[in-house]
Amino acid sequence: MKLRITHQTVYRYDHPIRNIVQSLRLTPSLFEGQKTHDWQIDVADGIKGPSFRDGAGDWIEGWTVRGPADQVVITVTGRVETRDTAGVLRGYREQINPLAYLRSTPATKPDAALRELAQHVTGERDQLDLSHQLSALVTDKIAYTPGVTEAATTAADALKLGQGVCQDHAQVLIAVARLRDLPARYVSGYLHSTEDGEPHDAAHAWAEIHVDGLGWIGFDAANRCCPDERYVRLGSGLDASDAAPIRGIAAGQSAEEMDVAVRVEEIEKFQAQSQSQT
Amino acid sequence: MDYYNEMYSGDKVREPYARLSEWVETMPADFRQMKQAEAEELFRRIGITFAVYGEGGDPDRLIPFDMMPRVFDQTEWRKLERGIKQRARALNAFLRDVYGRGEIIRAGRIPARLVYQNEAYEKAVVGVVPPRGVYSHIIGIDLVRTGKDEFFVLEDNCRTPSGVSYMLENREIMMRMFPQLFRQNRIEPVDQYPELLRRTLESVAPPKCKDRPTCVILTPGHFNSAYYEHSFLANLMGVELVEGQDLFVDGEFVYMRTTQGPKRVDVIYRRIDDPFLDPLCFRTDSMLGVPGLMDVYRSGGVSICSAPGAGVADDKAIYTFVPEMIRFYLGEKPILNNVQTWTLWKDDDYKHVMANLPDLVVKEVHGSGGYGMLVGPKSTKEEIETFRKKVEANPSNYIAQPTLALSTTPTFVEEGIAPRHVDLRPYCLCGDRIELVPGGLTRVALKEGSLVVNSSQGGGVKDTWVLSE
């Protein structure tokens, strides 16, 4: 698929503040399933700081807004060509040993209910089959319900509620996969549309589980599928906070409001840069 | 148990202590008491009252200072020095490896899970090669002695070992109170430590630094038990002591707020723990660190000493593999030995330890400060049985070691002078060179018969001498 992405995030503060520093993981990953064309990140009135590819293969950009500013506007635009790799992160370069993703974090810490859920899948299974079963189990246990959970909701809380959004599905799946000794991580990205063709106007997230011999494989428990050509992968982490596309902080904290607008459109073909400008 | 007395062999005084023995033997009791009071007064005036090694306890309590120095001769020290430097090289090679290709794991010499699932392992550092490949720039190695030529390493401290201010102050006070001792004995100096530390820090300036590097010490603040040491070292090195709020990231670099405006910082000797360094990378709720610091670090804009994630090399479980590291990376035979260690999460080790509790020392894997440990031979039957229940409840939380016959050195006590058990922590500096000042911090268990030297358990400190030839 050829996708055009526009993603704008606006942070508003109740009074002007200085020295806002952000770490952005907003550039599509490089692997067989994705090819990026003219990707651009812009932070209004911002100074671009360090940029580098980290050990997890993510492209990181640091930005500073000196301020005083009462809002920060981060705009990402670009085009991505995607290909279905059946969820397998093939041809991806990274240096972190998968075993580093067996560790739990406060957001993915297992409780009794998560432990019990992890043991729901029984019998002799290979890692791939086990991963599929666990993912399906999480889809069944958590009803997709926007508005009941928040960014700080933990996997244990989400399971107790039995409701949540993609972040919750991903974190619950990560928690149970780790309990079965499968390295698992949180992935942030975009989704073109859900299977019923409805537009999806927020950033998306799913889980990746490491399977011996195949490597990392994506599982989107929120949509009961593996990522395909409708998915655009940005980066990963141990949980939602660790994988966040935007991590930022302002000196002299002030109440913060956030607006996000994401558009992921399919386009016929990529026009050459010179033509699109005429 | 027989203990090696570092001063006496039977009735004979060992050579390094020859002159000191005259001094001690001819010292009138009232003079000793007067000097002891004077020393205490000096320490109190200097304000050095922090607990060593983050032991907790009353932060304003003075750690007892014993005026009787501990002495090594050149031969003894040279061997220690070679052993410590060897260990420091291996530990840094290990860090370089586990944040790179992990050859020692591929070779099957260290279990992968011990490293990658270790809480101190920082995946954010993977692929980052700090200047000169050094991750741990100040390594404190805790040693005990059991015989003339027998030294054992108890543990390595690769993060931010504290206590070096005691090494410097103990010497300073001894020189002030007993100048004649320093004329009679040829004692190697230690006061070059701050200068060497500064040189070490400057030698690991980041690639983007083109001028003479600006170094700072980053402290969590004056509530920290080692704050005295942070400000003491900053003073002696002639660098700024800063807190997180004094630093900020702008563009590609880290700056310090000064009265003359922002000044770029190249090397940060941090005395705050990894999780608090940068809320954009680690704990989001940390107020102690510098937002954006890790991105600057990872892109070569600033050096952090020690590197985040250096702690994976000094874990009590990794400790057992240090001799293996020395053989693997350096192709050398370890000069200093490890203490035999049983890890209670292994069945065989568990069985052995539980059958021999009264003879062993059992420690918590993540414990420190002499709390939560059992010294079998010094414990009552009830104490042993209570401890046994704790171990049974959570075996993987414990390691065990044989009870070592820690050497003694003469120490001033109520009744005069008597042997007390000691350990030693030298501080090894790693930058463009590996350096070690001749000396270290000697801790002494002041309670008769006690083998626990931690200040929270009645330990004191001594000046440590290395005699030149």
Image (cartoon, coloured by chain):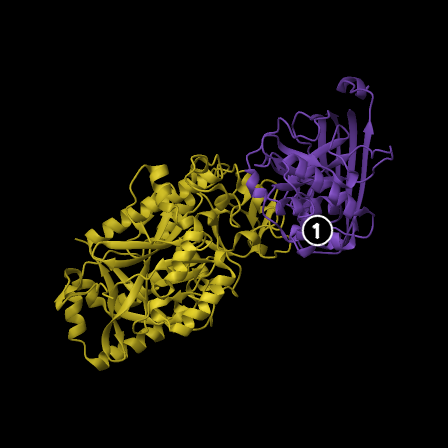
Chain colours: A purple, B yellow
Q: How many numbered marks does the figure carry?
A: 1
Q: Quadrant of residue B95?
A: top left
Looking at the image, which is closer to me, B47 or A150?
A150
In the displayed image of the protein, which residue is found farthest to the front? A123
Looking at the image, which is closer to me, A22 or B5?
B5
- Left or right of B39: which side holds B97? right
Q: Secondary structure at mark 1?
A: helix
In the displayed image of the protein, which residue is found farthest to the left? B12
Looking at the image, which is closer to me, B374 or B263?
B374
In the displayed image of the protein, which residue is found farthest to the bottom? B30
| Label 1 sits on residue | A155
Q: Is residue B343 visible?
A: no
- Left or right of A117: which side holds B17? left
The kind of residue tagged 1 is Ala
Reply above or below: B247 against B64. Answer: above
Reply above or below: B332 against B67. Answer: above
Q: Position of residue B34 (x, y in %)?
A: 27, 79
Looking at the image, which is closer to me, B270 or A19?
B270
Q: Is residue A196 visible?
A: yes
Q: Position of residue A240 (x, y in %)?
A: 69, 46
At a point 37% along the width and 40% down the height, the residue shown is B432
Chain letter behind tag 1: A
Q: Quadrant of residue B352?
A: bottom left
Reply above or below: A213 against B320. Answer: above
Q: Quadrant of residue A138?
A: top right
* Quadrant of the drawing holding the N terminus of chain B: bottom left
- Left or right of B207: which side holds A124? right
At a point 82% along the width and 19% down the height, the residue shown is A278
